[in-house]
Image (spheres, helix red, strand yellow):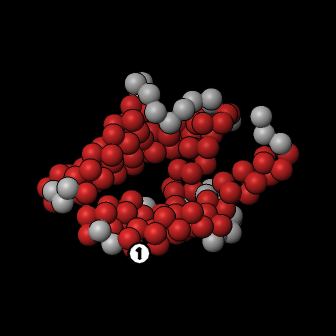
Amino acid sequence: MNTPFLDRLEDFFWARHSNPKSGWTRVPTGPVLVYAIYRRDWRILIAAVLFATVNPFLFSPPETEDAWMTRAVLAERWWIREEANGTVGRTYPNVCNTVSALAFVYTLVAAWRRRPVGTTVGTILAFGLKFWWVGALVRRYDDRETKRR
């Protein structure tokens, strides 16, 4: 159960994270993490984790919801909070995110073992499926707006 303070903090986080600059600058964080593990470069790994942590607080809330990335972030929050769906599962579209997460775990293992083909294929699969999932959420989010009119 959230307190009013936690609700305000969550609203603050999501409002700032929905700035398209926040979303698009976070996208490369995953591949950078993979690269850092592959190269065993702990400074890059720590920098990527720190950047991912502070990124949503670096940008002001967007002025409009016109940008696709803004709608992607808002759709994710809507999907989880208002529609009471999780982010993983065996039904569409959550199956895309489930397989994406599994592919990312495989990618991290492949990077640790320094298997370049597995690392590359896993990264492409993980991020392709993640964008597929987010795209499906955006379409549902946009359809929700159309149905309200």
Residue 81 picture quarter: top right
Question: Looking at the picture, does residue 135 appear above or below residue 56?
Answer: above
Residue lying furthest top in this view? 91
Name the spot of residue 78 as percent of width and height, x first: 63, 40
Question: Looking at the picture, does residue 9 appear above or below residue 89?
Answer: below
Q: Residue at x 37, y 63 (%)?
A: 33
Residue for badge 1: 43
Residue lying furthest bottom in this view? 43
Name the spot of residue 30 as percent of width and height, x first: 39, 59
Name the spot of residue 114 as percent of width and height, x first: 18, 60
Q: Residue at x 33, y 68 (%)?
A: 36
Drawn side of residue 102 relative to residue 69, left or right: left
Q: Nearer the viewer, residue 131 or 6?
A: 6
Drawn side of residue 133 relative to residue 55, left or right: left
Residue lying furthest right in this view? 4
Q: Residue at x 57, y 51 (%)?
A: 73
Q: Nearer the viewer, residue 115 or 55?
A: 115
Residue 83 picture quarter: top right
Q: Nearer the viewer, residue 59 or 10?
A: 10
Tally the numbered discs. 1
Instruction: Using the rendered image of the protein, determine whether residue 144 is visible from the camera's viewpoint.
Output: yes
**In what element is the residue under mark 1?**
helix
Sort mark 1 into few (<14), some (14-19) or many (20+) by Cα contacts within 10 Å.
Answer: few
Instruction: Using the rendered image of the protein, determine whether residue 22 is visible from the camera's viewpoint.
Output: no
Q: Dividing the image into 4 quarters, which one contains the N terminus?
A: top right
Residue 15 picture quarter: bottom right
Q: Amino acid at mark 1?
A: Arg
Q: Dividing the image into 4 quarters, which one contains the C terminus?
A: top right
Q: Residue at x 38, y 71 (%)?
A: 42
